[in-house]
């Protein structure tokens, strides 16, 4: 098998914003003293008249974005996931989601990926917070290529939308390299099998593929679904797969409460109750550590996941 | 303003007060005190100063108005109805199920509302975004944000004050309805804001202080605010419950509706003015 490249989804996001900026003059970008970290610095350098650094004041940044949207602009506000979705949560609720405004929210360093910065900067609950808001769309693209497509889909989408991105580089996902368009509400079938359904999003999709490859060596065939659109969720794809395999596994870099695992549990129990095992952060905060050490400690690497998935299948 | 113009605005304000109290009484729910304190400012803006088209509420060149203290919505609804945005019969539906007049402003339901508010302390940030959009496109509209003094306890306001100063949003006018009271009592006894004007000047704003019930002073301040290189804050000294003596002296009317008897008494007092 050919070794897949590792790329930065943040970088892909920043580059794509630049491309979109040319086609979409209404696009205005707001940063919160994390311009470089969120990669909107590329946009800021090229389009200084359309970039505003709101400083370390996320609540005002979200309000200003809402005012821009109410005036016909297409604002995008970027910060760390934790500051967009937790610090400014009520601003997102009252000034963006409730009036259903066309505001694009991008949270980088999502999940445990702020790694060595520790739990204050990690965001294990952002998808749950955003998913609970009416009118809000939630995306977690899997790799750099899908991030490019998702960024375009996000800007094109009218209405409140949140996209989370990791800090670190992610291995390109085999089944996504040919993806041409990101359709909100549509998942991707990456591998096909009858024995178990493995659903992942964000950085965990690449791990899910490796888990499935590992299972294949033991003659267990997994249906692998990439669910980068957490809300709306591709329930059709999910249920069809669950009907086929009768066993579902979710993997996410997020608390297992209210994110991908939560969304899948809700959809399955409503439509087709199925045995489910959710892997993610188990209702705890993160801690400091090197990226690979931290994910491994939390059991979120293919190496750690594969035997656990196997246990679940054989139960 | 000419005497005739002042008389016209006075009449509008009087009528807005009457409709506001009727609405709240009928709904048996709402905020009379803080609604009455902003009526004169609203009357001057909507009756005289704003560049707006009530029959074309989304006119792109209109001046923007954000009522950050969203609980004063009844006064704004009455003003919008009386200046031609919608039929005044609608006012009787305030806070009822299915009404376009929500308890707090909903821009997607009420014609003429430029933003949805209710959660305090957020309007000035939104106004910053609107003023910024105007500057990016070299549009001439002015953005007005009306906040209560109590809600200045929300830190987001001070983030917005810094942002407006940083980005030289001189097309943004902040009006502080400084009635000195909040739900649970005098602002200075709860979390004292000190000298609001001085603080805002320290934040780089031009500051004007006026009697918020003197129509000529309101008009003049709103006009003057256009001429500065910096964003302008108009500190309007007001009286919570202004116009109805028993509401002026009892802060319990912050969020307590009037009984039928109290309404009749109030309407009589307004007529005698």
Image (cartoon, coloured by chain):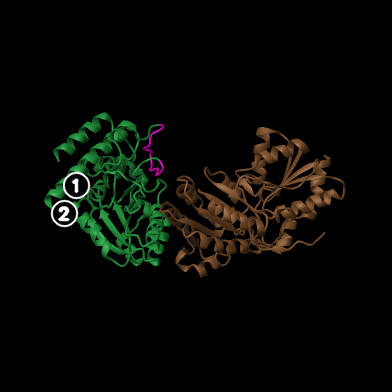
Q: Position of residue A135 (x, y in %)?
A: 52, 44
- Image-based side of A40 in relation to A293, left or right: left
Residue sitting nearer the eye, B79 or B186: B79
Give the drawing colour for chain A. Answer: brown
Tell which subunit mark 1 falls on. Answer: B
**Can I make out residue A129 in this image?**
no
Q: Are marks 1 and 2 in contact (CB under 8 Å)?
A: yes
Q: Quadrant of residue B14?
A: top left
Q: Quadrant of residue B231?
A: bottom left
The residue tagged 2 is B1
> Dot 1: within a 10 Å radius of its alpha carbon, few (fewer than 14), some, or many (20 or more) residues?
many
Q: Main secondary structure of the magenta part?
A: loop
Give the drawing colour for chain B. Answer: green
Q: Is residue B102 magenta?
A: yes
Q: Position of residue A65 (x, y in %)?
A: 46, 56
Could you tell me how far apart the alpha carbons at marks 1 and 2 are, in whole angstroms? 10 Å
Residue sitting nearer the eye, B258 or B112: B112
The residue tagged 1 is B9
> Dot 2: within a 10 Å radius of its alpha carbon, few (fewer than 14), some, or many (20 or more) residues?
few
Magenta span of residues: B97-108
**Can I make out residue B133 in this image?**
yes
Instruction: Residue at 73%, 38% (x, y): give it.
Output: A242
Q: Quadrant of the C terminus of chain B?
A: top left
Residue furthest right in the image: A218
Upstream in sequence: badge 1 or badge 2: 2
Instruction: Residue at 32%, 52% (x, y): give it.
Output: B62
Instruction: Residue at 24%, 62% (x, y): give it.
Output: B224
């Amino acid at each position: 098998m050919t070794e897949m490249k590792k790329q930065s989804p943040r970088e892909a996001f920043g580059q794509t914003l630049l491309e979109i900026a040319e086609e979409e003059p209404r696009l205005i970008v707001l940063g919160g003293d994390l311009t470089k970290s969120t990669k909107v610095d590329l946009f800021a350098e090229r389009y200084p008249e359309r970039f505003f650094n709101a400083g370390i004041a996320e609540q005002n940044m979200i309000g200003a974005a809402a005012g821009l949207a109410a005036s016909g602009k297409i604002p995008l506000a970027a910060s760390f996931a934790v500051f967009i979705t937790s610090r400014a949560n009520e601003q997102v609720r009252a000034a963006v989601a409730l009036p259903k405004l066309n505001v694009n929210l991008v949270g980088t360093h999502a999940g445990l990926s702020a790694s060595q910065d520790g739990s204050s900067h990690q965001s294990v609950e952002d998808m749950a917070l955003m998913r609970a808001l009416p009118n809000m769309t939630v995306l977690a693209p899997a790799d750099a290529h899908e991030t490019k497509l998702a960024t375009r889909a996000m800007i094109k989408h009218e209405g409140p939308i949140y996209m989370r991105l990791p800090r670190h580089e992610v291995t390109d996902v085999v089944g996504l390299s040919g993806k041409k368009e990101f359709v909100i509400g549509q998942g991707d079938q990456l591998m096909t099998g009858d024995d178990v359904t493995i659903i992942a999003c964000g950085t965990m999709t690449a791990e899910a593929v490796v888990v499935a490859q590992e299972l294949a060596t033991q003659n267990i065939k997994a249906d692998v679904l990439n669910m980068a659109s957490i809300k709306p969720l591709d329930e059709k794809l999910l249920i069809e797969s669950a009907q086929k395999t009768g066993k579902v596994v979710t993997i996410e870099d997020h608390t297992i409460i209210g994110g991908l695992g939560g969304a899948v549990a809700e959809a399955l129990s409503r439509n087709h109750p199925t045995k489910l095992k959710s892997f993610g952060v188990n209702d705890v905060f993160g801690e400091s550590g090197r990226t690979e050490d931290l994910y491994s400690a939390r059991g979120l690497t293919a190496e750690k996941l594969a035997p656990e998935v196997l246990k679940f299948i054989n139960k | 303003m000419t005497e005739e113009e002042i008389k016209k605005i006075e009449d509008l304000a009087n009528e807005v007060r009457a409709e506001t109290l009727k609405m709240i009484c009928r709904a048996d729910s709402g905020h009379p005190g803080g609604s009455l304190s902003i009526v004169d400012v609203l009357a001057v803006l909507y009756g005289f100063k704003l560049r707006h088209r009530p029959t074309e509420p989304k006119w792109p060149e209109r001046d923007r108005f954000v009522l950050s203290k969203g609980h004063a919505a009844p006064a704004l609804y009455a003003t919008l109805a009386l200046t031609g945005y919608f039929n005044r019969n609608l006012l009787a539906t305030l806070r009822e199920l299915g009404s376009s007049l929500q308890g707090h402003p909903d821009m997607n339901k009420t014609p003429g509302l430029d933003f949805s508010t209710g959660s305090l302390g957020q309007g000035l940030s939104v106004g910053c975004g609107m003023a910024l959009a105007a500057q990016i496109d070299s549009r001439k509209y002015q953005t007005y944000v009306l906040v209560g003094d109590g809600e200045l306890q929300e830190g987001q306001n001070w983030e917005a004050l810094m942002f407006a100063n940083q980005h030289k949003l001189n097309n943004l006018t902040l009006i502080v309805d400084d009635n000195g009271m909040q739900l649970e009592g005098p602002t200075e006894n709860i979390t004292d804001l000190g000298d609001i004007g001085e603080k805002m000047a320290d934040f780089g704003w031009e500051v004007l202080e006026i009697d918020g019930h003197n129509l000529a002073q309101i008009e003049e301040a709103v006009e003057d605010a256009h001429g500065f290189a910096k964003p302008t804050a108009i500190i309007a000294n007001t009286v919570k419950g202004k116009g109805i003596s028993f509401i002026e002296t009892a802060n319990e009317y912050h969020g307590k509706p009037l009984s039928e008897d109290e309404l009749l008494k109030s309407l009589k007092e307004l007529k005698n003015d």
